[in-house]
Image (cartoon, rainbow, N blue to C red):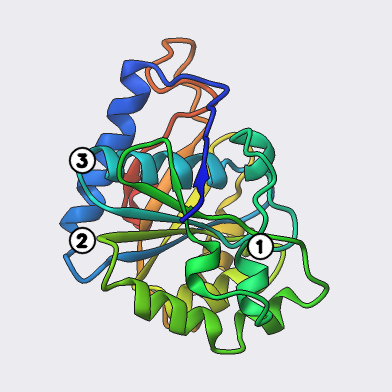
Amino acid sequence: MEKLEIRDDVELSNREKEVYRTLRTNLEFTGVENRAIAVTSCTPNDGKSVVSYNLSLALAESGKNTLFVDADLRKSVLVHRLNLKNPSKGLSHLLSGQAGANDVIYSTNKKNLFMIPSGIFPSNPTELLSNGRFEKLVAGLKGTFDYIVVDTPPLGSVIDAAVIAKICDGSVLVLAADKSSRNEAKSVVGQLKAANSNVLGVVLNKVDYKGNGYYGKKYGGYYGKYTSYY
């Protein structure tokens, strides 16, 4: 198994780390059956990739073998954001039949954290995600990992996240406090439910608490039921 060196640009504060530990705990409280989690958002730049990565890291730090899957096959930012050295193969290679699971799963320098990067961006991501290989991958890896966290494209922009969420045990929606609207959130939750996804809750991200900095503008969040916010 090849190894990826993750180099975080931003070190979370103790308060921010506590937010993700709370998110981890609330996720665990939803039930042991919820082990494969799709994370999506309404629109780009809501912070879903940051949330999904830090949730994966929090799970790994608690001793859980955690697989972080970059399933944004359209515009992934994680290779750049995590300063990864261009992984040779990724999820798109597996979905197109060019690689097997063992070829695309990487260990990392973070204890208990493993990763599947996105790979090259294909011209037909929805078709690849729907061809049965992703479903088989998730089902097979549940026997190896305690949690599988899947970062998906924004559902408000493309349908890929609904395809992924249907395969996973549950989904989490990331909303940006400074721009996500009530109607956008209701629309995305409706799409997730139409895909028979178990919507576990919402992360309210980019919260500005009038300068008190409790969660921080960039990484702040809160986890709870969708109806807690509207």
- Residue 9 is left or right of residue 93, and the answer is left
The residues bearing labels 1 and 3 have C-alpha atoms spaced at a distance of 32 Å
The residues bearing labels 2 and 1 have C-alpha atoms spaced at a distance of 25 Å
Residue 138 % position (x, y): 41, 75
Nearer to the camera, 63 or 11: 63
User: Which residue in the protein does label 1 denote?
Assistant: 156
The earlier-in-sequence mark between 2 and 3 is 2
The residues bearing labels 2 and 3 have C-alpha atoms spaced at a distance of 17 Å
State the residue lying farthest toward the right: 123
Density class for disc 1 (Cα within 10 Å; few <14, some 14-19, many ≥20) is some
Name which residue type carries label 3.
Ser
The answer to the question of whether label 1 and label 3 lie on touching residues, with beta carbons closer than 8 A, is: no
- Residue 170 is left or right of residue 159, and the answer is left
- Residue at 48% over, 10% down: 211
Q: Nearer the viewer, mark 1 or mark 3?
A: 3
- Residue 1 is left or right of residue 45, and the answer is left
- Residue at 75% over, 61% down: 120
The secondary element bearing badge 1 is classed as loop
Q: Which mark is residue 30?
A: 2
Residue 150 % position (x, y): 48, 60
Q: Quadrant of residue 127?
A: bottom right
Density class for disc 3 (Cα within 10 Å; few <14, some 14-19, many ≥20) is some
Residue 75 % position (x, y): 74, 54
- Residue 186 is left or right of residue 17, and the answer is right
The secondary element bearing badge 2 is classed as loop
The answer to the question of whether label 2 and label 1 lie on touching residues, with beta carbons closer than 8 A, is: no
The earlier-in-sequence mark between 2 and 1 is 2
- Residue at 47% over, 43% down: 53
Q: Nearer the viewer, mark 2 or mark 3?
A: 3
Name which residue type carries label 2.
Thr
User: Which residue in the protein does label 3 denote?
Assistant: 62
The secondary element bearing badge 3 is classed as loop
